[in-house]
Amino acid sequence: MQEHNKVVIIVGAGTSGLAMAGCLSRLAIPYIILEREDCFASLWTKYSYDRLHLHLRKQFCELPHMSFPTSYPTYVPKNQFIRYLEDYVSHFSIRPMYKRNVESAQYDQVSKKWIVKAKNVGGSGEMEEYFGGFLVLATGETTDPYIPEIEGLSSFNGDVLHSTKYKSGKEFENKKVLVVGAGNSGMEISLDLANHGAKTSIIVRSPVHFLSRGMLYFFVLLKLFPSSMVDSLLVLLSKLVFGNLASYGIERPQKGPIYMKAKYGKYPIIDVGTCRKIKSGEIQVLPAEIGSIRGGQVELKNGKSYQFDAIIFCTGFKSSTNLWIKGDDYLLKDDGIPKPSSPDLWEWKGKNGLYCVGLSGRGFNGSKMDAQNIANDIKSFL
């Protein structure tokens, strides 16, 4: 078994893991970064659809210590964001160890180090051990694609795919396509399908908030006003911009978008054109979940049946981090989110040098503790 020693072990070479590596590099803190895929930021490079753009203005999406080129548009498209990440990796000489599937991580009270065991699935297949005084989880929420169990799904005689396999709607022109899952990916994939001439339907089971990109900047008011007041403002703006969508099969939650994210982890829909397509009838909303499937026939739990040529599951992910982080003090929730006793998860860290970065948890800003703060904290112990 191979052994490796570093001050910091980072698990995950997504955008948060890269940001963490960049900050540690600036402080000359030795680290190693383990990634189960064969590339960095695989969610962007391998598992995202072609029309994807950043939903926030570029100045809010920069990684630490490196700005986007001035030539980039306000809302950066996928291909340019990947190019930016490539430049970031090159600039900070980040060299992840790819095809390392972490199977356990445990803190040793004797050596005062984290022991991380990872299988080299890209070469020898042997188990490797990594030792570090600090462990940073940059595994995020989007770990393992999830497709729910549905009676008769295996009998469906059309195309079935998860959103991570979807690239463009052009291959679905004139086909009847059902999108399952009404999060941001489901809504934007529905828009892309409709733009390419697919006969698109989307299942929307639960109430959702629609916000425009511009409305996101009202979240800065949280620094000045109570969240309930900002929520009320956002709901009012949403009503003015999008109107009442109940007649189209979409209900608005009784609580505001900030409350829904903090309490239930539910993001609002950042609309980039889907709402207009729903109102025009180009996207049909089905307000009931699938009961069963028979061949190409999809029967919903409200008793209605529809014929489809393809089903695209935008049903999210399951995090597996909670399966390999060992010790009662470090247990995570089933979705991979750390569960401290305090409801304030904006800056979370465990004891014995365990940190989480890039896990959205229940805070609207994303990270529990941004990469630079973690790097500074680690530096204070050295």
Image: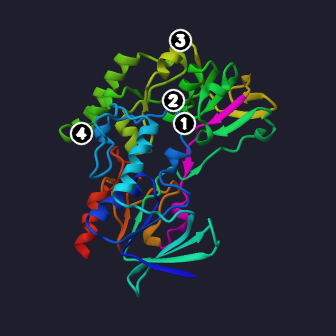
Query: CB atoms at circles 2 and 3 under 8 Å apart?
Result: no
Callout 4 amino acid:
Leu
Q: CA distance from mark 4 to mark 2?
A: 27 Å
Residue lying furthest top in this view? 280
| Residue under label 3 | 280
Q: Earlier in the sequence, mark 4 or mark 1?
A: 1
Callout 1 amino acid:
Tyr
Q: Which mark is residue 222?
A: 4
For this view, does 196 lie left or right of residue 60? right
Q: CA distance from mark 4 to mark 3?
A: 35 Å
Residue at position x 50%, y 68% from top?
Answer: 325
Q: Position of residue 350 (x, y in %)?
A: 36, 67
Q: Earlier in the sequence, mark 4 or mark 3?
A: 4
Q: CA distance from mark 3 to mark 1?
A: 24 Å
Query: Residue 67's image quarter?
Result: top left
Is 374 or 197 nearer to us in this picture?
Answer: 197
| Residue under label 1 | 49
Q: Is residue 350 visible?
A: yes
Sort mark 4 into few (<14), some (14-19) or many (20+) by Cα contacts within 10 Å: some
